[in-house]
Amino acid sequence: HPWRLVYQSRSGAPHIPWLEPDICEHLEAEHAAGVPAVVMAPIGFVSDHMEVLYDLDTEATAKAAELGLPVRRSATVGSDPRFAAAVRELVLERAAVERGEATARCALGALGASHDVCPVGCCPARVPRPAAAGA
């Protein structure tokens, strides 16, 4: 299924450009394009809080209802026991490293675990680029 990255939670003064496209504007565009339904996934959040509840569950859902566009929001991991266990394991792993203990490091995929602290020259500064918002 095709996907798009869109933004919620506009902050700052209204005359200052923000990240685009806005979720409600995007819902309008999807509806106009004949998309039959939309799933919203708050990828920047691990738990439900006011930004997720208001921006997606209230504003975006109301916009979708106004358009007659079926919409659902995927759950955040929140307090799922598997997520809590994964965070616990990461904390224990980091504590062992800080104590100087050898520890097996969990990783997904073929690349293995990355380093904990960037070595010199690992993350060189990049030349600033112009903001894309409002362009």
Image (cartoon, rainbow, N blue to C red):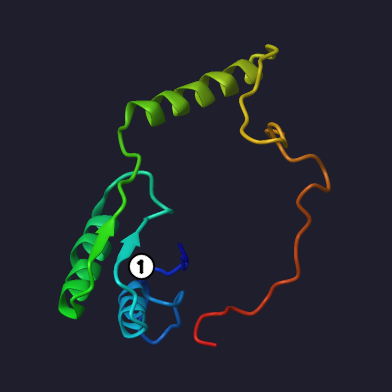
Task: Say which of 118 and 45 sits in front.
Answer: 45
Residue 91 vertical placement versus 39 (above, below): above
Q: Could you tell me which secondary element the residue under label 1 belongs to? A: loop
The residue at which mark 1 appears reads as 8
For badge 1, the amino acid type reads Gln
Q: Residue at x 21, y 75 (%)?
A: 63
Q: Is residue 62 left or right of residue 49?
A: left
Q: Is residue 132 left or right of residue 24?
A: right
Task: Say which of 31 and 53 sits in front.
Answer: 31
Corner quadrant of residue 40 = bottom left
Q: How far from the left and from the top, in percent, is residue 54? A: 22, 62
Q: Is residue 17 left or right of residue 47?
A: right
Q: Is residue 128 left or right of residue 72?
A: right
Q: How far from the left and from the top, in percent, is residue 5? A: 47, 67
Most distant residue in the top direction: 101
Q: Residue at x 26, y 63 (%)?
A: 56
Residue 47 vertical placement versus 19 (above, below): above
